[in-house]
Amino acid sequence: MKRINRILAVTSFLILIFNLTVTSAQDLVILHTNDTHSNIESLVSGRNKGYGGVQRRANYIDSVRKMHPDVLLLDAGDYNQGTPYYTLFRGEVEVKLNNAMGYDVISLGNHEFDNGVQELAERLKKAEYTTVCANYNFKNTPLEGLVKPYTIINKGGKKIGILGLLLDLDGYVNRKNRENLIFRKPVETANKIARILRQREKCDLVIALTHIGFDADNERQLSDQTLAKYSKNIDIIIGGHSHTFLEKPVVIKNRHGKGVIVNQAGTAGVFVGRLDINF
Amino acid sequence: MVREPDGKICGNGLNIDNMKRLFTLLILTCLISTTNAQQVRFKWKAKRVLMDSTWNKPEEPRVKAIIDYYKPEMDRLMQQKVGESAREMRSGRPESLLSNFAVDAILDYSRKQTDKEVHFSLTNFGGIRSTLPAGDVRRYDIFSIFPFENYLVVIDLRGSSVKKLFNTLAKRVEALSGNVKLVIEGENLTQALIDGVQVDESKIYRVATLDFLLDGGDNMSALSEALLVEQTGVLIRDAIFAKIEELTAGGNKIDYKLDGRVLIK
């Protein structure tokens, strides 16, 4: 009995130590923003008065990077349009700041198209991050080659596949600003690519970086929640567009009965979302 | 097993209490290791970090250099005070201080621009992006509220199209001038008046709105039935600036009221 007692004590201690190590040394830290809308400075009015600002965001990201070697920095689109920074400098400040903060991957939002496809293409040529959007065909447009359906990032010895999704721009972007862009159904596209990422590319983690909204604007539009439900092989959906302030992510069962983490970080850079992952 | 008078356990021999405690500890640690796992394939925890003054320092130098480069030009062009508001004014459905102010200013402006009558105005909530601060109002604030390069247009619309428009608005309302009165129950329109009068299907109405909405923006298909489109060549933002200028010149502050123009029951 003495031995049992000791074994129990040792096992218990080991589990405790294991827990402590895994929770204090995560394999991957995902930081994410969405719909920052050219809010370079902190907000001066409204319910989020006094919050936000790119300098603070950069300082925070820096502090996390000092603690963790493997930080994945993502944005779910609409980093353009919303303050005079965009009006005056036509999006060049936002790209420079995204480069400086070291964003890894950004998905396209509808407001990226506000000054047309040609201007967007010129800006993206200067981007040091990968722009993803899987459900638009950019062939024979200025964006061909500048926007990828998905990308794979290696961090901490793990393969992370990230695909982009964008809502149907009809009703959101002037016709002349979206000429020759062909929309494809997001769920089918996402599942097809997620399968490639999981099975062929052997990704340890599959993320959908979306700009379709946590809730749908109208019955024609898809939402992140619906996408999660009908998805296969997607682990995490990081979304934008609806400016939804989620206190914590929601977990929705997918077609295989597996949980998909769905998150969104409001708007204007008021919050940075953070997910700590242990594989 | 040795139990001292105060109940403290000493020694490391067999002890039922001791075993129980260890068991509890074991179960607890197992529980800790499985919480959060849910049905997800990996372990995770999430939080959101508020970007408040906690993160003011130390300043990341690359971002600081970019902001230092652009901000002087920004301030030179955008920091001028254009007026003063009596209070903070927000925008939201079905009506709000800021949206009422804006859409009425548009009607006012378009009436001054054109010789013919303008019956009402319509703008979208999606085009009002920020909150008007209390007190001093700078160019920066107006550009942040109306960042889009949307132009003011005046369109001719048949009464039947106006009815169709109002029925669409019953599902998702947009900002309407104060001389329009809509009562919506559920998603159905139970009352629609312009200047206190029912919409006349055979009449031609002149409506001030945005070019963006004519192009299918926010899915207001009734507007594509416009018989005639008069371009004003004026940005909605500039119509707002004109209104603020007029108020300031008269020694007035920017202020507005709610009037129940759209009631949702």
Image (spheres, helix red, strand yellow):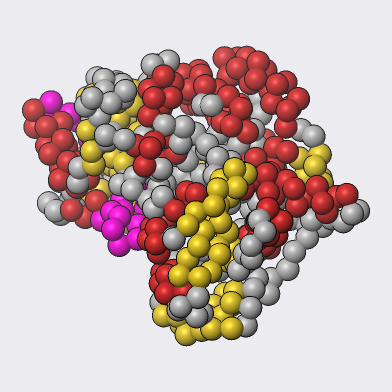
Residue A200 lies in quadrant = top left
Name the residue at the left extreme: A200
| A137 in magenta | no
Measured from the top left, where is residue A178 in percent x and y?
34, 37
In this picture, residue A50 sits left or right of residue A75: right
**In the image, which residues are magenta?**
A201-226
Q: Measuring 42% from the left and 74% from the top, which residue is drawn there?
A: B160
| A212 in magenta | yes
Is B93 rendered above or below residue A102? below
Q: Nearer the viewer, residue B85 or B65?
A: B85
Question: What secondary structure is the stretch in magenta mostly built from?
Answer: loop
Q: Measuring 55% from the left and 48% from the top, which residue is drawn there?
A: B231
Q: Nearer the viewer, residue A169 or B177?
A: B177
Q: Measuring 35% from the left and 57% from the top, which residue is drawn there?
A: A216
Measured from the top left, where is residue B45 in percent x and y?
37, 42
Is B171 rendered above or below residue B228? below
Q: Measuring 11% from the left and 32% from the top, which residue is drawn there?
A: A196
Is A122 rendered above or below residue B209? above
Q: Nearer the viewer, residue A82 or A233?
A: A82
Name the residue at the front extreme: B115
Does any portion of residue A52 appear in the rendered image? no
Measured from the top left, where is residue B197 in percent x and y?
59, 83
In this picture, residue A85 sits left or right of residue B109: left
In this picture, residue B63 sits left or right of residue B254: left
Residue B107 lies in quadrant = bottom right
Is A178 rendered above or below residue B122? above
